Amino acid sequence: MPQLGKRLAVVAGLLLLAATLAPPLARVAQILFAAHMTQHLFLIVGAAPLLVAGGVRLPIRPVWAWLLFVSVFLFWHWPTAFQWAALHPPAGFLELGSIFVAAVIFWSAALDGPGLSDGGRALTVMTAAVVTDLPGVVMLFAPTAICVMPHENAALFGLSPLNDQQIAGLLMWVPANLVFFGIATFLFARWISPRAFSSSSLVKP
């Protein structure tokens, strides 16, 4: 990426990080579960990959990066965990901070990790997408509201707690997958393109 592009990516990542942690989103996230999940999405598929693309990286071995990210993601999407974090400001900071750091580590490995081809990086991204889809699927299709904020007030927005949970699940499922699979497709295309050029050269006269 050109130097200007890297700088723009860093600026965009920092702006998105600020928007995630500041009002109005941070305030609404206290009473609306979908807004809280939007914070997670902004960190995972917005700020983190933008900062990594701009050169901000926390590299560890890809397998450990994958395990760390998936473990942190699944833990904080357990209702008891995020409700505890919502009730205690230091825990809330730990929740968002750990999700962000784990996402930066994951994207550092997925976009430029050592010991992996672009095909391996694409597979890393796709498998992470499949595993992290699970909470969103549960939220979307659960018959009752199991994921609500401690100070839930979905009625203020004309929603029931179940509607709020379903929107959150849909957000986690669709927009997140668009980013994950978009990046995976790019990495896969970059992986096969040298081979395609090599193969075509074999048939040239």
Image (tube, rainbow, N blue to C red):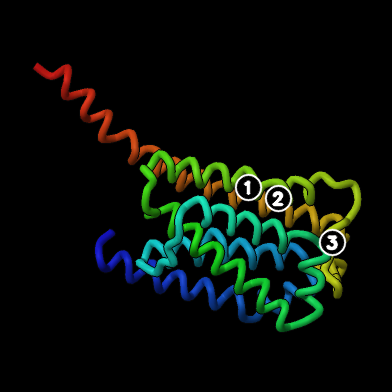
Cβ atoms under marks 1 and 2 closer than 8 Å: yes
Mark pair 1, 2: CA separation: 6 Å
Using the image as rendered, state which of residue 123 and residue 36 is in the foreground.
123
The image position of residue 201, as x and y in percent, is 16, 24
Residue located beneath label 3 in the image: 159
How many C-alpha atoms fall within 10 Å of the one at disc 2: few (<14), some, or many (≥20)?
Answer: some
| Residue type beneath disc 1 | Val
The image position of residue 203, as x and y in percent, is 17, 17
The image position of residue 188, as x and y in percent, is 40, 38
Which residue is at 77% across, 68% downward?
82
Which residue is at 36% across, 43% downward?
117
Most extreme residue toward the left is 205
| Residue type beneath disc 3 | Leu
Report the quarter where the N terminus lies.
Answer: bottom left
| Residue type beneath disc 2 | Leu
Check residue 174 in the rendering and tell me which mark sits there, or answer none: 1
Which residue is at 35% across, 69% downward?
8
Using the image as rendered, state which of residue 55 and residue 177 is in the foreground.
55
The image position of residue 92, as x and y in percent, is 71, 77
Q: Secondary structure at mark 3?
A: loop
Q: Quadrant of residue 84?
A: bottom right
Cβ atoms under marks 3 and 2 closer than 8 Å: no
Residue 47, relative to residue 112: is it above or below?
below
Chain-order first, disc 3 or disc 2: 3
Residue located beneath label 2 in the image: 170
